[in-house]
Amino acid sequence: MLDRMKKDRIADKIKTNHMEQELNARVYQYNTQSQKAKKAKQQQLQTQVVFEEVTKQVDIEDKKRKESLNIFLATIKSKGEAEKKRDERIKRTQDIAENAAAEIRDSNEKKWRELLLVHKFLNYFLKRKMEREMKQYESVEQAFQKIKASTGLTDAKEIVNKFVNRE
């Protein structure tokens, strides 16, 4: 019996040692797994933090791009409006210039018409005056033509000199 108890005790010690070894192995395995899980969790948290930072940066850059785009679009719009205003101003200036040219042309035409009428009127009066004077001196002209035909002299001064020297 004592032998048997000794054997049982030795068997129990062997079992206990074996169980302790198995327990130690499992504790080691558990600790290893737990450390791996902690590392994985830490990496996951770090990845999540990095992801959030990257997301924030992307959002900030997106906002900056949108702001830049809005500024660019506003600039394009203002330049378009400025160009329209400039085109309208140029058109108004051209219209004013055309109107002024037309007015000048009209006033020039008016002046020329007035001058034409004045010249026609003056021409008419001068022509009538010349005709009256021609009628008035027609007898003198006929006499001069007769003298010219009879003497053969064509220069009036010569005829006058000859007549004056004769007396």
Image (cartoon, rainbow, N blue to C red):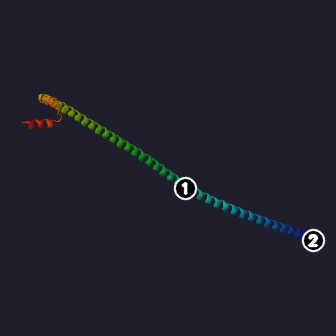
Disc marking residue 165 = none
150 shown above or below 2: above
Pick the residue in front: 138 or 19. Answer: 138
Pick the residue in front: 68 or 85. Answer: 85
76 shown above or below 118: below
Identity of the residue furthest to the left in this view:
167
Q: Earlier in the sequence, mark 1 or mark 2?
A: 2
Image quadrant in which the C terminus is located: top left
Say which amino acid is labelled 1.
Glu
Secondary structure of the residue carrying tag 1 is helix
Say which amino acid is labelled 2.
Asp
Which residue is tagged 2? 3
Gap between marks 1 and 2 measured at Cα = 84 Å
* Residue at horizontal 69 percent and vertical 63 percent from the top: 39
Give neighbour class at mark 1: few <14, some 14-19, many 20+ (Cα, 10 Å).
Answer: few
Is 34 situated left or right of 120 in this image? right
Classify residue 101 by image quadrant.
Answer: top left
Classify residue 157 by image quadrant.
Answer: top left
Q: Position of residue 41 (x, y in %)?
A: 67, 61
Pick the residue in front: 72 or 122. Answer: 122
Is 85 situated left or right of 36 in this image? left
Q: Position of residue 118 (x, y in %)?
A: 20, 34
Which residue is tagged 1? 61
